[in-house]
Image: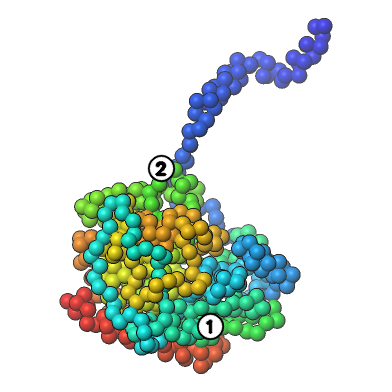
């Protein structure tokens, strides 16, 4: 009976039999930890000061011409399997998922096999799913009948701690007809008098669909002229987004960080050629090229919240996407900023904001959004902004992107009036824990009483934006003090509500007004952009109509602001 027991013991490795006591102690220790600490959350933090980044380009394809050279004509051709395209469209229409398919890309005569392409957008794509026209783009000419006459009153009322938004209902989007309504062109679906072009997209016209082109989706490490992603913006001919191109041109003129762009002729399989606006996609490559590796970029996700929700970094991943320096840096700087902005008293905010935020840079950002009548900035429904954390100064700056809703609303809107759908653009604001009552979180002057068809609803109302494309989060409901869903952004609201920053904001506003409008640069740039679009093959009559409408808006805005005391004082 002893022989079997001996054979069983010999099945245990000799080294383990000789050292069974340490192994047994380890097992007991792990059991104790599991019993007493099994439900304790372990919070990972990266404390290294390194700026290393493992996500590097290993195959950078050289182009025949500079991709964004506005003195050259550009072309893009995409070829893919019709079966793959049909499957992709069915997946999107049935489930809302935007999946990549393989395509061969020829850009300015340079061939790249096996790139990835997928649909890009949120509300823009709703017409593809039977949800009405997709919103976006510029609107109709100034001077149409109806709508708001005034640029709005100075909004001094704010919310007290814990109060909810009193305006009620959904936030509002610009639509047509304002006497001084900002414009840009007749929309694809009857947007001639509107503040937003309505895109009627169809799977039968893939050359007009908004596409995200991923150069390295199937070939790791590959890029084209340093770009791994390219965005083809929606709109052709009379709906070509000249407003977005003009906004980017004005930002570049003033020395602000802005995406590069170019008009290009686009051909998809055997379909007719369409002229499109091609824009850099805000990504690691964009940040590296514009700002280098001296800081960390955090892209806000659509529907994201600016609330402080505790010390666990994973709780913020649905609100912010880290673009660069992954592995050596983390989300802790954003968490510290959100905690302070949400918890600081008014006096503390006014006294210490410059310890957390580059006030001069932020003043320029906020002034720019107002001057451009940007309906969808950091306080808008899309949360179109990137937080840049400078590792040297330990301060944040804000970068804007996606300007297809600029020049929306009322051309007479002043520096102290709101422009964003979610508010946060006028004087007044919210105390920590609350939301603006009748001021900052209210709708901009001249806005209609309801959202246009196809505009995204707040996640709090049971509908989410597309997580894959816009980095959407299910954080924050409408009107939240932190800016979740459709309702503003607490940093912007508190900045504009604090008298301490009036001088910095107004100085930036006056300076940028001179550079954008008073100098005549905006109108000159618009003429140049229209010519570029026509050289790329856009319909001359359509582009001319759009440019004329947008020119009227720019002229009205220039003249109205010239009388404002911020400019004259």
Find residue 28 and report its image quarter. Answer: top right
Q: Residues within 10 Å of mark 1 (few under 14, many from 20)?
A: many
Q: Nearer the viewer, mark 2 or mark 1?
A: 1
Left or right, residue 214 beside residue 361: right
Left or right, residue 430 beside residue 110: left
How far across and how far down the image is residue 330, in percent?
A: 45, 48
Residue 377 visible from this viewpoint: no
Query: Does 254 sit above or below residue 59?
Result: below
- Nearest to the observer: residue 266 or residue 93: 93
Q: Secondary structure at mark 2?
A: loop
Left or right, residue 83 beside residue 319: right
Q: Which mark is residue 59?
A: none
- Identified at 46% across, 47% down, the residue is 315
Query: Does 253 sit above or below residue 481?
Result: below
- Nearest to the observer: residue 84 or residue 297: 84
Residue lying farthest left?
A: 569
Task: State the quadrant of the C terminus.
Answer: bottom left
Find residue 434 and report its image quarter. Answer: bottom left
Q: CA distance from mark 2 to mark 1?
A: 47 Å
> Which residue is labeled 1 in the image?
188
> Which residue is labeled 2 in the image?
311
Q: Residues within 10 Å of mark 2 (few under 14, many from 20)?
A: few
How far across and how far down the image is residue 369, in percent?
A: 35, 71
Residue lying farthest bottom?
A: 541
- Identified at 29% across, 77% down, the residue is 151
How far across and how far down the image is residue 15, in percent?
A: 68, 19
How far across and how far down the image is residue 393, in percent?
A: 32, 54
Left or right, residue 515 beside residue 323: left
- Identified at 60% across, 18% down, the residue is 24
Earlier along the polypeptide chain: callout 2 or callout 1?
1
Task: State the quadrant of the N terminus.
Answer: top right
Give the image's coloring scheme.
rainbow
């Amino acid at each position: 009976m002893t022989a079997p027991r001996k054979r069983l013991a010999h099945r245990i490795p000799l080294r383990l039999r000789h050292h069974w006591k340490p192994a047994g102690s380890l097992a007991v220790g792990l059991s104790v930890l599991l019993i007493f600490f099994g439900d304790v959350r372990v919070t990972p933090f990266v404390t290294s000061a390194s700026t290393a980044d493992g996500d590097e380009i290993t195959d950078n394809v050289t182009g025949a011409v500079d991709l964004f050279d506005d003195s050259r004509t550009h072309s893009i051709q995409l070829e893919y399997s019709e079966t793959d395209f049909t499957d992709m469209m069915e997946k999107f229409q049935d489930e809302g998922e935007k999946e990549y398919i393989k395509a061969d890309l020829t850009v300015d005569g340079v061939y790249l096999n096996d790139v990835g392409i997928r649909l890009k957008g949120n509300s823009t794509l709703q017409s593809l799913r039977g949800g009405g026209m997709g919103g976006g783009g510029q609107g109709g000419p100034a001077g149409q009948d109806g709508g708001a006459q005034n640029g709005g009153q100075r909004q001094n009322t704010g919310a007290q701690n814990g109060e909810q938004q009193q305006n009620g209902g959904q936030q509002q989007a610009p639509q047509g007809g304002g006497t001084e309504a900002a414009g840009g062109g007749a929309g694809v679906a009857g947007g001639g008098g509107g503040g937003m072009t309505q895109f009627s997209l169809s799977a039968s016209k893939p050359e007009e669909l908004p596409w995200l082109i991923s150069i390295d989706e199937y070939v790791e490490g590959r890029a084209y002229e340093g770009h791994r992603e390219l965005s083809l913006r929606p709109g052709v001919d009379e709906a070509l987004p000249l407003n977005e191109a003009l906004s980017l041109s004005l930002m570049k003129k003033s020395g602000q960080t802005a995406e590069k762009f170019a008009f290009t002729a686009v051909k998809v399989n055997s379909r007719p050629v369409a002229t499109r606006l091609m824009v850099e996609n805000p990504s690691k490559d964009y940040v590296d090229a514009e700002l280098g590796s001296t800081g960390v970029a955090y892209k806000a996700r659509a529907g994201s919240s600016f609330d402080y929700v505790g010390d666990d970094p994973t709780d913020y991943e649905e609100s912010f996407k880290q673009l660069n320096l992954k592995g050596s840096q983390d989300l802790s700087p954003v968490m510290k900023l959100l905690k302070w902005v949400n918890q600081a008293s008014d006096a503390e905010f006014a006294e210490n904001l410059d310890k957390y935020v580059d006030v001069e840079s932020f003043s320029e950002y906020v002034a720019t959004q107002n001057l451009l009548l940007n309906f969808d900035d950091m306080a808008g429904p899309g949360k179109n902004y990137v937080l840049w954390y400078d590792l040297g100064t330990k301060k944040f700056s804000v970068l804007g992107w996606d300007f297809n809703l600029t020049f929306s609303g009322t051309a007479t809107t002043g520096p102290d009036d709101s422009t964003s759908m979610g508010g946060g653009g006028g004087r007044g604001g919210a105390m920590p824990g609350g939301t603006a009552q009748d001021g900052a979180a209210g709708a901009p002057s001249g806005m209609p009483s309801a959202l246009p068809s196809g505009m995204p609803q707040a996640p709090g109302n049971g509908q989410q934006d597309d997580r894959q494309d816009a980095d959407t989060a299910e954080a924050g409901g409408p009107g939240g003090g932190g800016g979740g869903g459709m309702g503003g952004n607490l940093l912007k609201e508190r900045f504009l509500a604090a008298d301490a920053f009036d001088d910095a904001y107004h100085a930036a506003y006056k300076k940028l007004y001179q550079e954008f409008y008073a100098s005549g640069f905006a109108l000159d740039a618009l003429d140049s952009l229209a010519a570029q679009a026509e050289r790329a093959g856009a319909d001359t009559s359509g582009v001319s109509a759009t440019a004329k409408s947008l020119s009227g808006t720019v002229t009205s805005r220039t003249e109205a602001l010239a009388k404002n005391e911020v400019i004259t004082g």
